[in-house]
């Protein structure tokens, strides 16, 4: 399938999206257990490559490293080890998440890798449909989103995180960190976090089923930000989370899509970042 649009149309692909999301959760359970831990949990994410999404390098107990890759061009999940071991699972054969996990963890045991995988993150016995053309279209969008995010990231000063896909939400994003520290209370515990702005792309979820871009300052100063206009039809969003939203569908087949996303990202950054500095 040849993709001609910078942002291809993503229509009637909910079943394929659910399959890819379920499989990404299984893949993501492995670095959660075996990767070298990062304090911001970046070790559990997946990174965009020319043919798919890949984990960080993970150490093998007897020396060497391995990765897991979701290969969107070959429509398969691959385990690749520096010691020569290989394993492949087709994404088109209808494996449930539990079936994929069972087969994958068996291969990991053969590599002397054992762990207490966080099963509630991925356990699911639903049947899995997969349309290769829809998967390729999504991956084409993902590649160009990652390219735009890297372009915007390169213009920012201060600390920034990597562009990464989070298996739990199936969204691609990165964070810019301000110098202001924010206290946040959860379950009776008070933690301190750096103020930040994320820029992300979601293929859609319960609160907003259609694909969209988002950029969410934390903390969100509603009084200062809500009166400010955003470009190209992007809007501030306060329904199920606080931030901003730019509908992907507005950009499909638009020859200026790349520039519009960059202008949206820059607008949120310039409006919000001064309030996130100490």
Image (cartoon, grey):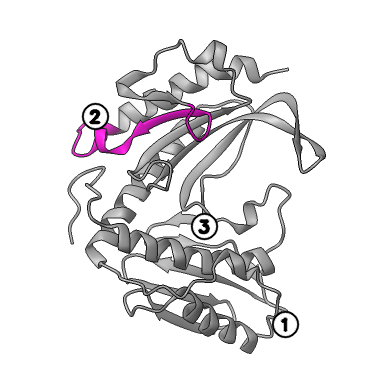
Q: In the picture, which quadrant includes the C terminus?
A: top right
Q: CA distance from mark 2 to mark 3?
A: 29 Å
Q: Position of residue 246 (x, y in %)?
A: 36, 31
Earlier along the polypeptide chain: callout 2 or callout 3?
3
Name the residue at 50% across, 42% down.
173
In the rendered image, the vertical position of residue 84 relative to residue 182, given as above or below? below
Please give left or right for residue 209 compared with residue 174 in the image: left
Q: Position of residue 206 (x, y in %)?
A: 42, 47
Name the residue at 64% across, 28% down.
158
Q: Residue furthest right?
A: 189
Q: Quadrant of residue 107?
A: bottom right
Q: CA distance from mark 2 to mark 1?
A: 51 Å
Query: Who is closer to the viewer here, 3 or 101?
Result: 101
Q: Magenta span has 239?
A: yes
For label 2, the residue is 256
For label 1, the residue is 62
Q: Position of residue 119 (x, y in %)?
A: 61, 70
Name the residue at 38% across, 28% down.
262
Q: Which mark is residue 167?
A: 3
Magenta residues (range): 238-257
Q: CA distance from mark 1 to mark 3?
A: 28 Å
From the image, state whether disc 1 or disc 3 is nearer to you: 3
From the image, state whether disc 2 or disc 1 is nearer to you: 2
């Amino acid at each position: 399938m040849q993709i001609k649009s910078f942002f291809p149309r993503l229509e009637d692909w909910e079943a394929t999206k659910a399959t890819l999301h379920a499989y990404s959760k299984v893949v993501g359970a492995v670095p959660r257990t075996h990767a070298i831990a990062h304090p911001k949990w970046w070790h559990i994410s997946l990174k965009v490559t020319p043919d798919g999404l890949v984990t960080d390098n993970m150490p093998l107990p007897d020396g060497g490293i391995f990765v897991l890759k979701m290969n969107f061009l070959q429509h398969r999940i691959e385990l690749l080890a520096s010691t020569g071991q290989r394993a492949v699972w087709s994404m088109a054969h209808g494996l449930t998440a539990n079936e994929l996990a069972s087969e994958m963890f068996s291969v990991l045991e053969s590599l002397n890798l054992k762990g207490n995988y966080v099963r509630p993150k991925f356990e699911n016995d639903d049947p899995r449909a997969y349309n290769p053309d829809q998967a390729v279209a999504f991956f084409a969008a993902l590649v160009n989103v990652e390219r735009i995010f890297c372009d915007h990231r390169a213009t920012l000063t201060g600390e920034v995180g990597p562009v990464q896909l989070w298996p739990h939400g199936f969204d691609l994003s990165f964070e810019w960190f301000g110098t202001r520290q924010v206290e946040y209370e959860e379950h009776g515990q008070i933690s301190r976090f750096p103020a930040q702005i994320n820029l992300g792309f979601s293929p859609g979820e319960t609160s907003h089923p259609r694909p969209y871009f988002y950029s969410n300052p934390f903390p969100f100063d509603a009084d200062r930000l809500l009166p400010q206009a955003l470009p190209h039809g992007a809007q501030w969003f306060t329904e199920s989370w606080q931030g901003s939203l730019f509908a992907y569908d507005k950009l499909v087949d638009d020859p200026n899509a790349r520039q519009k996303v960059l202008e949206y990202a820059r607008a949120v950054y310039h409006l919000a970042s001064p309030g996130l500095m100490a």
